[in-house]
Structures are given as C-alpha cells and as structure tokens.
Amino acid sequence: MATEFTASVDIDRRLYRHDIAASLVHANMLHRIGVIDINDLHKIQHGLQEILADIESGTMQWSTTYEDVHMNIEVALTERIGEAGKKLHTARSRNDQVVTDMRLWLRDEIDELSTLLHQAQDALLNVAEREVDTLMPGLTHLQPAQPVSAGHHIMAWHAMLVRDRERLADCRRRTNRSPLGAAALAGSSYPVDRQWTAKELDFEQVIDNSMDAVSDRDFVMEFISMAAMLMVHLSRIAEELILWSSLPFSFIELPDTIATGSSIMPQKKNPDVPELIRGKSARVLGNLMSIMTLMRAQPLTYNRDNQEDKQPLFDTVDTVKSCLTICTHKIFPHMRFNRNLTAAMAEKGYTNATDFADYLVGKGLSFRDAYQVTGQVVKEALAHKKSLDSLPVDQLQSIHPQIGEDVYQFLSLKSVVASRDHIGGTAPAQVRAALARARRNSP
Amino acid sequence: MATEFTASVDIDRRLYRHDIAASLVHANMLHRIGVIDINDLHKIQHGLQEILADIESGTMQWSTTYEDVHMNIEVALTERIGEAGKKLHTARSRNDQVVTDMRLWLRDEIDELSTLLHQAQDALLNVAEREVDTLMPGLTHLQPAQPVSAGHHIMAWHAMLVRDRERLADCRRRTNRSPLGAAALAGSSYPVDRQWTAKELDFEQVIDNSMDAVSDRDFVMEFISMAAMLMVHLSRIAEELILWSSLPFSFIELPDTIATGSSIMPQKKNPDVPELIRGKSARVLGNLMSIMTLMRAQPLTYNRDNQEDKQPLFDTVDTVKSCLTICTHKIFPHMRFNRNLTAAMAEKGYTNATDFADYLVGKGLSFRDAYQVTGQVVKEALAHKKSLDSLPVDQLQSIHPQIGEDVYQFLSLKSVVASRDHIGGTAPAQVRAALARARRNSP
Amino acid sequence: MATEFTASVDIDRRLYRHDIAASLVHANMLHRIGVIDINDLHKIQHGLQEILADIESGTMQWSTTYEDVHMNIEVALTERIGEAGKKLHTARSRNDQVVTDMRLWLRDEIDELSTLLHQAQDALLNVAEREVDTLMPGLTHLQPAQPVSAGHHIMAWHAMLVRDRERLADCRRRTNRSPLGAAALAGSSYPVDRQWTAKELDFEQVIDNSMDAVSDRDFVMEFISMAAMLMVHLSRIAEELILWSSLPFSFIELPDTIATGSSIMPQKKNPDVPELIRGKSARVLGNLMSIMTLMRAQPLTYNRDNQEDKQPLFDTVDTVKSCLTICTHKIFPHMRFNRNLTAAMAEKGYTNATDFADYLVGKGLSFRDAYQVTGQVVKEALAHKKSLDSLPVDQLQSIHPQIGEDVYQFLSLKSVVASRDHIGGTAPAQVRAALARARRNSP
Amino acid sequence: MATEFTASVDIDRRLYRHDIAASLVHANMLHRIGVIDINDLHKIQHGLQEILADIESGTMQWSTTYEDVHMNIEVALTERIGEAGKKLHTARSRNDQVVTDMRLWLRDEIDELSTLLHQAQDALLNVAEREVDTLMPGLTHLQPAQPVSAGHHIMAWHAMLVRDRERLADCRRRTNRSPLGAAALAGSSYPVDRQWTAKELDFEQVIDNSMDAVSDRDFVMEFISMAAMLMVHLSRIAEELILWSSLPFSFIELPDTIATGSSIMPQKKNPDVPELIRGKSARVLGNLMSIMTLMRAQPLTYNRDNQEDKQPLFDTVDTVKSCLTICTHKIFPHMRFNRNLTAAMAEKGYTNATDFADYLVGKGLSFRDAYQVTGQVVKEALAHKKSLDSLPVDQLQSIHPQIGEDVYQFLSLKSVVASRDHIGGTAPAQVRAALARARRNSP
C-alpha cells in the first residue's frame, strides 16, 4: 500500500521526453569527462532512443513498483543494455534530475503558451478593429458611465493579455536555468561540466548553488502566479461575456457552439463556455494556494513534499491552454455586437452627462459647480423621461442661464466618444492608432 | 452608518503624499493646455503645499464625511483657496486619480524594498564568508545526506533573495506606468497631455487604454505574488533557524535579542522572531488569496470592490519590510554556528557514503552496484557503531575485495566537501568563487 | 526593534475584559485550593477591577515593553498591589491563558453574531412576505429560465443564512471548552480544579488533554471557515443586488443611502455598499487561507507563529458583523422591486416554455419529444417577436397537431408560478407556507 | 472542441451508482403520482439495473458527446428501452439531479471517512497506551519545556481526530437533505412527492426552497473545510514524525515500509510517507480555496461554473482517505520510541525548571520571584554542564537560602510528570484515565 501511496509515475511520466533528453546530454558529458567510454555511451544513446520510441508508441510498461518516471526509464534501460545502463546515474541524483526535467518541460509549455497568448491577442485585435465605431455604454459599478467604442473596450482586454505575455517572458528567463550537476544537494565529486550540459540543453545559465538548485521551486510558484493572473483576466472577460449576452443586456450574441441548451427548458441558450472559464479560474487560484503553502515552511533541501508540486503545475498548464484556445477559436471571432441595442443603452444611461458638465466648465463654471448643475439637468430629464439632448434650450436655461444652443453639438454619443481624443482615449481615431501600435509591437 | 461602512480615509490617507504630488502635476498640465490660468495654478500649488505641511505636522483634520484621502484633500483645498480649488478635478476622476496614487506609492515602496533586499543579501554574504570552512550535514528529507560548507548553505538562502530582487525589478517596470488622464474610464474631453504628466511623475510609459488604466490591478496582484514568494523564502529560512537552534540540533545559537523567555519556564530561550516571521508568511499568503479572488470575477471597469485592494497591499508591504529589516539587523549578523556540533552530526549521519560509492565506481563498478556495496558497508558500520573511515580495511574487503587502503583519503568530511569542486559545488574554493561573483554582480 | 516586532499588545489588548474575567476565576480557584490566602485574593480582585475600570475609561497605560495584554495587566496589578500580584500567575502559563481569553472572547462574539444573523433573517422574511406575488424571471446561467415569485427568491437567501446560524451554533459548542489549567503544556503541579474554573466561566466542558489545550486552534479555523461561507452568501446576495439594480436589469431600486455618486459623472448612482460587501468577502477568504496555512505544519505545542492567529480572527469578526448589520438595516428593508419590469422580463425570456413542454407531456408525448416540439414553438415565436401565448392556435398546430386551445391556460406567468405547488415550489401558497414555517422555527 | 471543453463525463461518471439510485426512486415516484404507468416503470427499472451492471463490469460505452454521467445513462436507457426512457426526465432537471447525486455520493463517503477516522483513533489509542510511561520532553517553540508522557502527547493527536469526527457528523446532517423535486429551479408543475423520494433515499429532510436546492453548494464547502482542518492535523502529526525521526532528535524509529532510500546516498532512510502527507495537506487547502472562490460571486441559481465543484471535492475525498488509511495501518502501529533517548533529551533540556520554581513557591516566594531564582540556578547548572538535581545543595543555597535537601525529590523527570495529576495533566494515572474515557466514548 505504501508503494501505491508514494508512487508518482502516473503523474510524472508526462516528463518522459525531457527526462530522456537530459539523460542523453548527461551521458554525453560523462563521456567527455572520461567517466564512461564510447561504447557505453552508444549503448545508452541507443537504449534511450528505443525507450522513447516505445513510450511514444504506447508499448512502454510503466510500473508503480519503480515509483517514478526516472526509475522506470532507468530500469528499462538496464534491462535492455545491461551494465552500461547502471552507469547513467553516475554523478547525478534524482534531486537534480527531476527539477531539470521540470524546467525543460515547463520551458516548452511556456513557449507554447506564449504562442497561444499571441493568437488570442490577434483574435482580439480583429474584434476590436471590427467594432471601432460601435457605441456602447462604458460601465463603472456596472452602471452606464460614459459611452465608449466597443473596439476600445476590447482593446482593454487585449492590454491584459499583453501584460500576461510580458510576465510569461520574465518567468521563462528564471525557469530556463540549469540545476543539472547539483546532484543530491552538494554537487558531485566527479568533475562534471555543468556549463556544457546547460548549453547543450539550451539553458540560459547554470544555477549557481547546488543546494538552491535542488530545493528551489520558485519557477513553479512564479509560473502559477502568472497563470493565476492570466485566469483572472480570462475570468473577467468571461464575466462580461456572460453579462453582455444575458437577456436584459443583450449587448452581444454568442455563437451556438459555445452555448448549450437546458435539459428541461427548451428556450434556453446558456453561456456555458464562459461560465466554465470563470469556474476554471477558481481551480488555478487553488493551485496557486497549494504550491505556495506547500513550499512555505520546508527546510532545505529536497523534501518529498515536493512530489506534490507536479499536480498543480500540470493542471494549471492544461487549464490555461484549453481556456485560451477556446477563447481564440470559438469565442472571440464569433461574438457579435447588437449595435443598436448597445447604443440605445448608452443613451438611456445619460452617459453624456459628464460632457454636459464639461460644456459648462467651458462657459466658465468650476468643475464642481458644473457637476452640480448637470445633476439637476439629469433629474429634469429623468422626470420627463427624455434624453439630455431632447430637453429644449429654455428648459435648460431655467436651470442655468449660461446654457446655450451650442450645447447640443456636444451631446450626441458620437461626439462624446470622438472628444476623448488623446492617447488612450476612446475616440475612434485613437482606438485605430492603438490598434496600429499593437500590431506593430507584436507582429 | 453607511458612511462609516464605505469610508476609506483611515486606510487610504497613507497615500496623501503621492496624491498631492500627482495633483500638482495635473494642475500644471491643466495650465499648460489652457484650462486654468496662472493665478489659479499658483493658488492650487500653494494650497496643496500647505495641506502637505499640515498633514506631515499632524494638524490636518481628516473626516470620514469626505470618504477618502482624495476628497479630504480637495475639500481642504477649496476651503483654503476657494473657487480655484474646485477646478483641480477638471479632466480627471477619482478612478484614474486613486490608481495613479497607488502606483506612485508602490513604486517608492518597491525602491525601498529593493534596498532592504540588497542589505539582507549583504548580511548573508558576510555570514557565508565567515562560515565557508564550517562543516555541517547537508539535509534532504531532514536527514543527513552529504556534508556541506555552512557558507554554501547560507549562499542558497542568498540565491533566493537574488531572485526576489529580480522579480521586484520586473514588477517595478509594470507598476511604473501612468493611468493619469484616463479619467473615469473613457479618457477626457479636454486635450490632456498624458505623456507630459507621465514624464513629470517619472513614469516609464503611459498606459495605452483608458478602460484598462482604471480597471487594471495587475500591479497589485503581481507585487503581492512576488512578496508571497519572498515570504516563502523568509519562512524557509526561519524554519531552518528554528530547527538549527532547537536543543537536539544545536547547530546554531541565536542572539538573546530575538529570543524570549517563557512566562513560567525559567530555562527557556525561544526563537520567537523566526517563528513570527514564519507566521507572518501565512498572512501574506492570505493577502495574495484576497487580492486574486477580489479581482477574479469583476466586470470592467472600476467597481467599489477595489476599495479592498489597499488593505492587503499595505499590509503586505509593512509585513515584508519589517521581516526583512529584522533579519538583516537582528538575526543574520548574530547567528553563531556551533562548529564542532555541526561537524559531529555530519560524521554521525554517514554523509560520506556517496563518496564511498563513488570510490568504488573509480574501481570499475557501475554506480548502481557501487551503491549496493556501500549500503552493506554502512550497515556494518552501524552495527559496530563506527564511522566509515574507522572500519579496518580487511573488514571492508570482506564486503568487497576491490576496496583498498586508498579509500580512507576520500572519506574525511573535509575531503568529501572539497571534492565537489565545480561551479555551484560545495567545495570551499567554489563557495569563495560564488561569493566573489555575488559581490561583483550586486555592488 | 525586536521588541516592537514581537509586541502584540496593540492587537491583543482587545481581549482585556476576558483576560481579567479569567484571572479573577483563576485567583478564586487558587484560593480554594489553598495556594493564596484570602487577603491576597481580595487584593487581586480589587486590583483587577480597578484596572478594568482604567481600561474602560481610557486611562490605562499600555506599553509594548510588556509585549502583550497579559503582561501589561499583570505588571499593572503588581505595581498596584505589590507581592500579591506576583502570585496570580501561579499554576498557569501564558499558553493556557491566551487561549482561554480567545475562547471566551469568541464565544461572546458568536452570540452577538447569532443575534445579527437572526435579525438579518427577519429582515429577509419581511421582504419575502411583501414580494410573494411579485413575478420575476428565475435565472439559470444568468438567463431567464422559469418565472418565480420574488418572495421565493428572497427565501433562498434566507435559507443560506439559516445554515450559517446552524454552523455557528456547532462552532460555538467546540469553542466553549476550557483550556485553563493546561498551564504551559503539561498541566500544573498544583492541584488545580479545572472543572470548577470551567464551570465558573460557563464553559461547557474541560479540554481533556493539556497539550491539545494549548496547541489547538481548531475553533479559530472552524469559525473563520464558517464566516467565509457566510461571506460567500452575502457576496452572492450582493452580486444579485448589483445585477438587479443595473440599468439593463432594473429589477430593483436601491436606497440612496447605500449608493454613492461619481466624482465626475453627475448621472451616476452606484451600488457601492453591495460592491464593498462583495469585496470584503475576498478579505475573509484571505483570512481563512492565512489561518489554515499558519497551522498547517506546526509541531506541538505552542509556537510563536500563533501570535498571528488574532489578526485574521479579529478582522473576520469585524468584517462579518459590519456587513450583516448594514444588510439588515440599510439594504434589505429598503430594496424596492420594479414589479412591472420584472414581470416583463419574465415574459420576454419565454420562461413558460417548460410548461408548454409539460402540457405536451399531458397530451401523451414523452418529455424528450415534448422538449423538441417546444423548441420549435419558441423559434417560431422568436421569429415573429411574439410571446408563446400570443401565437394563434393554428400556427401552433402546424408545429404539432396535438396542441389545442387549452394550452393558453397553462402559459400565463401567474399560472406557471402557481403550478409549482409542492413543498419548496415557487407557488405563492407554498412560499407563504415556507414563510410561516420559517417564522415558527426561529421565533 | 467546445464539446471536449465542456464535457465532464470523465470526472462525474464516478456518480453513476447514486445517479441510478436516485433515478429509480424518481421513476417510482412518477408512477405513484400517475405520470408513468407500471410498464414504463418496470422497463426503466430493468434498463437502469442493466446499465448499472454494464458500468460495474466495465462494458458501458461512455461518450463525451453526451457530456455528463446523467445524459450518458439516459441515452443508454433510451437506446435500450425506447420511449419509456424518454419519460424518466419528466418533472426533474439536471440541476436537481446532479446535486441529489452529489449529496448521496458524499453521504456515503462521509460514512466511510467516519469509519476511517475511528480506526485511526483506535490505532492512536493503542500507541498511547503502550507509551504511557515513556518520558519525553514536551516542546514549546520546538524547545524542551516540561517532561511529558509520550502517551499523553499521542493523546493530543487523538483529540484532534475526535474533533474532526464531530465536525464530520455535523457536516453529514447538512449534506443529507434532499434537493430532488426542485427541478430546474422553481419546482415542478407535476405534483411531485418530495417527501416520499427523500425518505426513500434516506435523506433526513427536504430542502425547503427550490432555488436554494439547486444553487447551494454549502455542503461541498463545509466538507472541504472540515477536510482541510483534518489535513492540517495530519500535517502537524507528520511534521512531528519527520522531526522525531530526524537523526538529531531520534525520538522514534519509523518502519522501513514508509521510508525510502536515496537514488544516490546509500545511508539514507527518508520519512517519505509523512512528507507526502504534509505535502498533500497543501493540496486540500488549495481545493478549499478553489471551491470558496468558485462560489463567492455567483448569482443564483445554477451556473455552469459549478461543474468545477466536483474536481476539488473528489480529490479531497481521495486524498483524505488515502492519508488516513496509511496512517492507521502503516505508520501509527509501527512507530517505535527510543525511550532512553527521549528521556535523555528531557534531562538535557532542564525540563524540571518549572518545578524548581514551584518548589520555591512552596517555600513562600511569589511565583515571579521564584522564577527569577530558578533562572539563576539554571545558569549555574549550564555553566557546570550539570543537571539541576546534580547541583549540590550548598551551591543551590548560595543562590537562595531557602533551598533545602527536600528539593531533589521534586526534580526527577518521573516525579515531575507524576505531579501533573489533575484532569488533562500528563501524570500517567491521568493519561490512563483519559484513555479509558476515550475508549468508553467511542466504542
């Protein structure tokens, strides 16, 4: 029973490709420093390549008796090539081996994730471009605040993913460092060439302390932190998709492919996929908490607790990749704005009130006084169930004498949006400029 | 009651200095673009400087009636300078104002924290240098594994803090961006010069989407993530200080200043400060969970939920700074190794067994076979309560014939440690080289 | 500096009343078992009562020099009454003292919280009663599903709080146990009468293992878990209040006292209080994570880490109490349903479609077939922008011949709601019965 | 791709047994209220039993096309029995179905877990009984404090598990309530007999609000909270096992079956299983955070986010069960105390110092003064590397004149332990009494 309890091969065998790659480089290095001869090296190379082929074709016999991916492969190698196989583990330990594998594996996943992020960004740029001139109510506190370009709103989503990719690149740098040669914890009594193995495995640098090399899991914590922020972003986007496609909002239509019906209510079209994305963000937050609390009070160097670092890491990678992929291919390209309805809601929400106040500032009122006057105008409009720009000028002047005919030109949604005409503003010209910059910066 | 419930001034008034700094630059910009005249600008400048002086001298009257730090200052300004004060809020909103303040405040704290990290690293380098030749058992699974230089172990702590400072610098870059001019969410209808205000406030760039500018709290999430990892490190260090100073270990003595007695047991000397550091790491993990879950499902743009972003941020900054400071000044310089006891424990733990196996590999055995033989040697030694190097050679040869007199030279702790003589290894020469590199890279 | 770092009196002095209460009982017991004479007891009683008065009148001089609330009071006592004061700590330790204080304090807070929960429930019952006949769309996936009584919906909120109060009572039982007499960890060499002190302090039982008594913080973890679930409930309620009061929904009006305006947008009325409640739930989740990770890897018995148990506990109690209070007094009694708008949205969402299918089942179709047919009917209605009950019968029959004139009687919202006429169903009669049961079960 | 993204059958098919059980009762009820005839009922019963047999024999064809366990079974049923199969879903919805299944499933798991907890308690009682007279240093702050009976220490572990079982029973009550009949959210238009189905399924009560019934996941949150506390306990126990079996402590020997060797260091015996338990507690804390944050901001009633409630629940149940089982069978019965070493460490730690002070109190000193004097005695003993009871009486008297020959009788570990002779104290007689009570209360 204890064997079953401690065995990890069902989870960590996912590292097989990187385990073999690292073993090949390690064997090569052992030969270079004279620890194994050329025959043994060739046998090891041959054996490992055969094992790789077996694994990929599904004929490898994995066994919990040999605990983990490393021992399974080593045992298979020795069965295959005899004595030479037993020499492979010279000058290394499972402690540096497992963390070398994890770093190589995660580096590949980071690269894939970076591509997925880039694709998601592209998909958003396309939506933004299509919707630059779509008017919708920008919300604060879920209440209409000021009208914005829908393209501008989508570009805010894009900005989140840009930061995610920056953070991912930072995380890659710190992941891509070689612990190999740290052995159990103290380094090796063989003259191992750590720089050579690092270079062969495309690591950017050697981790400069053997005890740190085997005990550090910062790269896992940092990756999951980054992924948690990314999932917070996808969750916020999902939240908006759910809101916007709700019947009362009806800002957008979601494609049938990501919505499902009810088992009992024939009229239903539920935004299942965004809801699941929102739900899966909770899972990644849980993974973050797991890995942080796992590492929190461990003395150096390696402790078996760390076997539990793989589950949250693997699960996080899988979750993030699937959520990003479905956003890019099934959601973003297919969301359709109900442009009339978004504009109508912006009107209804008096989103041009700030501009009314700004108009009064132009007439010489201080902003705080203008704000007070506009409040009264909005009340008047509400009482008559009218929009601001359909109140007659004499009615306006009875509230404040300096309001003139020229006020109306500032009050259409279109002119309100167009007036935010500075870098980062929602004016269509600015949104187009932002789009161009985004495409330029991330070709 | 609702006023008391929603007021935040008791917490956010901590931002006063940065709020005033940003207001001064905003006012200047308003003048530059012709929104306020030079007289009003001078009044505002004067008024804000007086308010700053009042706050720092403790004579400012804060009131929850005005909710937050921003309104308190604006009200005080208008009381002082009249009409001109009401103009300051033109072309901005509390939404861009609060996040500008937070970014400026956090940037300063990051810089201070970076200095504290550097000082802590220096303190560790001094300990490491002093203890390069101290021998102690390196532990895996809390069991003696191989002997290491105590200086090498301390350098593993140092390596953690080096990564923390890297991450802090990355976080600073993403913090140091200007949201000012985003106004409520859509930008301003005034021709605000966002690049100019950004430059004046030493921001590295302008945030390129107004909706993102007011809704993004990534910099808070990223900072607390970074801080949580840092606290995980301090907690791991604390865990070792507690273990090492426990009576059974007795590896080190802690200074009396960080230990306290018992209210009832006169013989006690408790490692209170490391225990508190370990405890406080839990607090920062909690803060991380708060901020992540806070942001997770918020639709854009600003929601009042975000008032709750300050408490975890402020608490995290305070906690990390106090923990680092006490480590640097009260713990690291004063911990003393019981060098005889650490060496004795390394002996007792057969930490030279790996080298015995390596010796056999040198005689031609494969590592796996050498490992088996050494296992028998250790059993024999245990049975006779002897160290490996005090077993006579004929007894050793009865276990395996290839063991010769030359084995003993490999078995002293000193030679075992010295043999890990490659980059990152625990050989004193390597530890000294690592120290030199560390001092060079972070002058 | 270390003194400042380790001192906790600024936080734990909140326990003063319970600390003094426990000391009085302890002193009494010491006299009963002959450890202190009657004169000393009287001096201690007198001294402690004076100190209590000083604290409550604000004249107590707290000092971080004496670390915590316990030492501050003991020092003040000895200054006041001399030698007798030094005897008070006989046969106890700060280890059992602090946890006795915390349990007494939390017990009182639990009782207060239980009252607050009861008041909140009452407030909800009043809303539910008022809105039994209000029709609104019940939502799944944020989409209209079936019409419900608004009172029924409010009763779902009530049900959450009923469970919270059950859990609170369970938690009280486990909190209300006496650790006093456990002393440092092993019990006392004096013949302390633990049952007597427990009884005097109204504890339900004595904790039956001295080591457990000083190291256990389950009552804190359990309380914060309970509180986190309660905050999840308030957060879900807040989420609905925010949604329902958003312009597109407009299901309810929130009172002005809990909404605030914008600093720049004169038309805004933001649901600040519900947003803050939602935000504060994140804070309590963070506290839960703190306390759990704090306790997770501590060896027995008391470790200084536990000083950090107070901050999350106190903060949780304060947060929960203020959120519940504001719900009870400022939100629940003042929310107003826009009854026409909720009914209209239920119509618009085809929430009677399930009943259309059920009608067909009555005609002999299997539910799965009926579901298919109804789907087509809904499509037809959508295409003609009509409600189900305004489609003419021949149009319906062209979709399925068994549809007859009798279908219309099943399709009004009122009859749909009334038809859910079993225990727990949304029929007004059932809601009224549920209300009556609720009032009966919790008078 | 979206199908794959949303399908949950790979995870939720674990509920098959309870899904079928609930369907059988539902079908029966449908027949009782006249919705289906006896033939259809028999077909459904037959069909479901065949499907159950197929699943248990591994011949069921699960398909992600049908999303989840419920649809897979319903589709299989209709394939098998035709029209009658389509009638099963009358008067219910997946919303009440899934949560009925989960409650039934969890109730069974709770019962199993309760048994496992009881067995673990029994295993601890046996250890405690065996070690009542074993003397060891009781630790606070990981430093020797006072000597205790090892049996007493083990009973502190037992006390944790007793509370866990109490909480589990409370959680069972709130889990064991029937949501069946709530249908989608509003109840059913059929006259469903919810009380009858509840009784048939052994539920203790009917959930009294249909909207609450389908949206509430308190039972999942409460269960995982309870499990997290249980894992905190196992983690604290594991922490002590790791410490106690470390070479410096050597308080206990762990069985070879739960320790593993190193891949490179032949002398190692690592406490892998306790380390994994400690590690797995982090996983359950992560699950707790997931479920709490998942539920935190969901509006009523059912949202697809809740598909993500199963992974953390299932994983928690599996983790807790495997950890408890291995403790009960592989760890507790086989841990062996090194009784001489524990006693020696208690001596070395001056754990009798409190009793020295108590002796002085007996001579008339106040406790605080006695504490000071004893501090000097300990210093003197340390300086001479002697135990307190080997300092000659004249040397003691030079520190305080009232110390007499009678002091020695109070200083042996045995008498120190025996003197804590009150309920909950560590005196062997008290530990035996506690053991007897424990066996009596939980036969």
Image: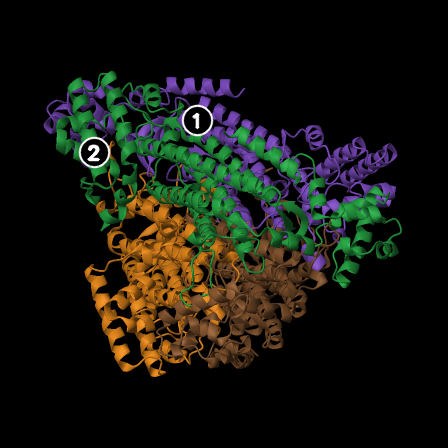
Chain colours: A orange, B brown, C purple, D green
Q: Is residue A367 visible?
A: no
* Residue at 23%, 60% in the rendered image: A60
C63 or B253: nearer the viewer: B253
D199 or B280: nearer the viewer: D199
Assign the N terminus of chain C to one quadrant of the image: bottom right
List x then y, in percent, for residue C430. 38, 19
List x then y, in percent, for residue A11. 33, 55
The residue singled out by tag 1 in the image is C155
Assign the C terminus of chain C to one quadrant of the image: top right
D20 or B227: nearer the viewer: D20
- Chain that bears disc 1: C
- Seen in the picture, residue B391 relative to D93 is either above or below; the reply is below
List x then y, in percent, for residue D101. 32, 33
Q: Is residue A55 visible?
A: yes
- Do the residues at discs 2 and 1 belong to one chain? no
> Does residue B420 appear left or right of residue A164 in this picture?
right
> Does residue A354 appear left or right of residue D34 in this picture?
right
- In the picture, the disc for residue C34 is none
Count of marks overlaid on the render: 2
CA neighbours of label 1 inside 10 A, class few (<14), some (14 to 19), many (20+): many
Where, by quadrant of the figure, is residue A28 drawn?
A: bottom left
- Seen in the picture, residue C238 relative to A327 is either above or below; the reply is above
> Does residue A323 appear left or right of residue B332 in this picture?
left
Report the Cα–Cα distance between label 2 and label 1: 42 Å
The residue singled out by tag 2 in the image is D53
Secondary structure category for the residue under label 1: helix
Where, by quadrant of the figure, is residue D198 drawn?
A: top left
List x then y, in percent, for residue D117. 46, 37
* Residue at 65%, 54% in the rendered image: D344
B203 or A381: nearer the viewer: B203
